[in-house]
Image (cartoon, rainbow, N blue to C red):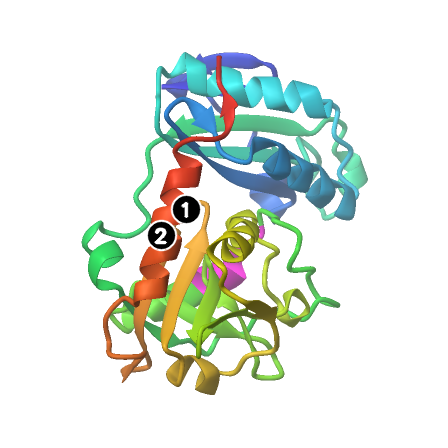
Amino acid sequence: MKIWLDGQLVDESEAKISVFDHGLLYGDGVFEGLRFYNGRIFRLEEHITRLFDSARAIVLPMPWTYEEVIKATCETVAANGLQNGYIRLVVTRGVGELGLNPYACKTPSMFIIAAGIKLYPEEYYQKGLAVITCATRRPAPGALMPQVKSLNYLNNIMAKVEAIQANALEAVMLNEQGYVAECTGDNLFLLKNGTLYSPLISDGALDGITRAVIIELAAKLGVPFQEKSLTRYDIYTADECFLTGTAAEVIPVVSLDQRKIGDGTPGEITGRFLKAFHELAGSTGTPVA
């Protein structure tokens, strides 16, 4: 496997960063996850724009231009001879000193991985997920801005631990007011009486790029869409539910906290969104070469 590391494509065994890198020491950095299908990177420009926005929000100066990051991402996929897969693009604060001072880091570091990924077993895309509500809450925006895709992912990891310990593959995360924010790594949608709903971004959800795609598809499919504050009750009483994310794509949810959603099977409208998403993702995107 070839890894893009600070301007060079190197073998996986040579892709190393310093133990003094603040991304490792303090989770100080940002990342993006991208998908590519049939040799095209899906929504590449949107992902790189969000990467730069995240970096700007944490005062991390990017020594690369937008165009250079686009080119590096395409080069990494092409160098690995892949047609379909997942990209992880990471920017760290760089090598610094022991201590929190980010200004001690002189030069940020960036690496790009292109490989395969399977977030959930294939069978669950057919039969749906049984999810739980976890006790771990999403941080308030005043504590850690949910729109920043930072390397500090411990909040999500602790929620994932709860899910695994409860023999579930995913967990719904609430904010401190008790409203639904998102899942450990995915955005959430539900359908009720023919209308599609998703939590407000201000309730702690990431403004996901796959989420935005689903909202676009809702307009094309003639499904009314509304953002609103949601509680667990709204999910319990929904007709259908599904999750979205770059790695997850679109996956149905059939129960929450052992309560069936609808009839306990993936819904018909959810199936329409799955089909429309795969058709779009498989036919559009930025060519890698």
Callout 2: 10 Å neighbours few (<14), some, many (20+)?
A: some
Label annotation for residue 277 = 1
Residue plotted at (65% across, 39% down): 51
Instruction: Out of 4 and 230, give the one closest to the viewer.
Output: 230
The span shown in magenta is: 152-158
Left or right? Give the position of 112 relative to 129. right
Mark 2 falls on what kind of element? helix
Disc ID at residue 274: 2
Q: Which image quarter: residue 114?
A: top left
- Verify CB contact (< 8 Å) between mark 1 and mark 2: yes
Amino acid type assigned to the residue bearing label 1 in the image:
Phe
Q: Could you tell me which residue is drawn at 60 percent across and 38 percent down?
A: 47
Asked if residue 250 can be seen in this view, the reply is no
Q: Of helix, strand and loop, which one carries label 1?
A: helix
- Give the percent coordinates (x, y) of residue 83: 35, 23
**Residue 52 in picture, x, y percent from top left:** 71, 37
